[in-house]
Image: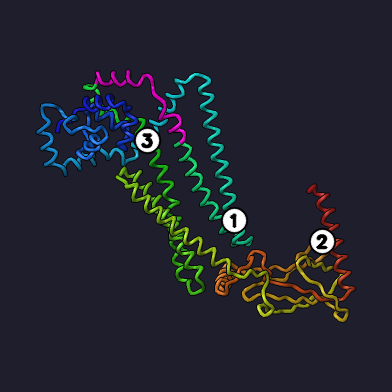
Amino acid sequence: MKFSGKKLEKIREDNDYTQEQLASTLEVTTLLLEKWELGTVYPGKDMLLKICKVFKCSMGDLLEEDQEEEAEETAAKNGESNSNESKEQYSDNSNINFVIKSISNFMNKSYNMFYNMNFMQRIKCACEIVIEGLILLVICIILHNIVYGFIQDIIGYTTIGNRIADIIGNIFAIALTVMGAILWLKIYRIRYLDQYKDENEELNYKKRQKSKTKEANNQKSKIPNMLDKVVSIILKIIFIICMIPLFALLVGIICVIVMSVYYIQYGTIFLWTALLLLGISILVLCLINLLYKFVASKFYDLGGVFTAAIIGFIIMGVGIGATIATYMGFEEVNSFGEGDYKTATVSIPMANNIVFDGSNCEYKIDNSVNDIQIKVEYVNGATYKIDYNNVSRYKDYYISQDFGFLNTYKLVLQDLKNSKVRNYETAEYVKVIITTSQSNYDALKLNSTNLNKLQSTNNTFMGI
């Protein structure tokens, strides 16, 4: 099939279409449209029909006059071949070089637009762009604060509630940032680039037309040029680096999904959590797929990725809503029941050099007690240790406690099974009650005061 680029150019100019406008209508790049008009590549049958529909012309109007009939017969017989040819021509859109060229084209248009403006036009344009960006930023911040505050009020100001609100808030903030950036670029393009006409475009294009024979021979060797290759390699390396944490995140999410499914017996909140994480995993997979297609320079179906992302957002939204609704039915508890504690008692003989760190202890006065009785109440699984440090002539006693990660994990599961939630960071796993006489209590306070004075003197002497 002999396609005529000159005829396409003439029809385009007769219908007052710029290259950018026609490329946008046909959903192709300006670079590919230039190749058609230069005659270095040819559009496929489907694209020819689309062009004819745009300009309301026949296919023969786009072909060489001496071969129109033969070309139409060939096109009809070899529709499948033309389709494959079209895919091959569009393969330029499916690799990273297309993205680089699109960004480069966008930057070149912006540069040429600003270069051809006078000083006042540049100031006006810059101010409008900045103001539009600030307005969108303020709107995004307001929406984020409203949604975050609403979620915080619904869930409550607990440790788990704050973490859930932070996760949802961060996801919403990222989505707002992406949508805001896309909207800002769209406004910039419609407001400025689409209305801008480069005065030298026609002259430059006619110069290219005069040397189209030379361009046809050298076009493939120039594109992509060395700079494009370097940028492609750098971007591919960046994308590969970005894919590593995404793979790690995906593995982590899958592990938590499996655990949530396993623990469904403890409550339906695990089912909704698994659903929420499934939606997030779909979004992560979509992102990994896009990055892989960029790196491997393979054809990608944006429609399919977009559909999968929408499904992921829907599943995630259902999971979030069901999780919050289930969480709202939980009872918030701040302490353990009396039956949850075990008791141990330790006695320490009273001496003149004993100091007891009783900041987290409860004191009881019993004048019938001569020594220091320490009653420790601890939750099953909690450990404690009573020891002292030798500070000067004093024995400074203290009580350390630990509940352990595994015990905390089991406690969380048990609470979720009972539809309860608590602040696990400040929970009182160990309670200490010190019983002694009034005289011993006064002596302990005096020793503590003297030790603090001694330590203050030593710190002052050492310049601390």
Q: Which residue is mark 1?
A: 150
Residue situated furthest right in the rendering = 439
Picture coordinates of residue 83, whole percent (x, y): 20, 42
Is residue 201 found inside the magenta-colored segment of the image? Answer: yes
Q: Are marks 2 and 1 in contact (CB under 8 Å)?
A: no
Viewer-closest of 460 and 210 = 210
Q: Amino acid at mark 1?
A: Phe
Regarding mark 1 in the picture, which secondary structure is present there? helix
The mark found on residue 392 in the picture is 2
Question: Hey, which residue is sitting farthest bottom in the picture?
Answer: 368
Find numbered disc 2 in the image and state the secondary structure of the residue it sits on: loop
Name the spot of residue 256 as percent of width and height, x first. 47, 63
**Mark 3: secondary structure:** helix
Tell me if residue 349 can be seen: no
Are there few (<14), some (14-19), or many (20+) residues within 10 Å of tag 3? some
Where's residue 145, x and y in %?
59, 49
Q: What type of secondary structure mainly makes up the magenta span? A: helix
* Residue mark closest to the camera, 3 vs 1: 1
- Pick whichever, 235 or 263, lies toward us: 263
Question: Can residue 363 be found in the magenta stretch?
Answer: no
Q: Which residue is mark 3?
A: 100
Mark 2 and mark 3: Cα distance apart in space: 72 Å
Answer with the quarter of the image where residue 370 lies.
bottom right
Residue 130 is drawn in which quadrant? top right
Foreground pick, 369 / 40: 40
For discs 2 and 1, the disc positioned in front in the rendered view: 1
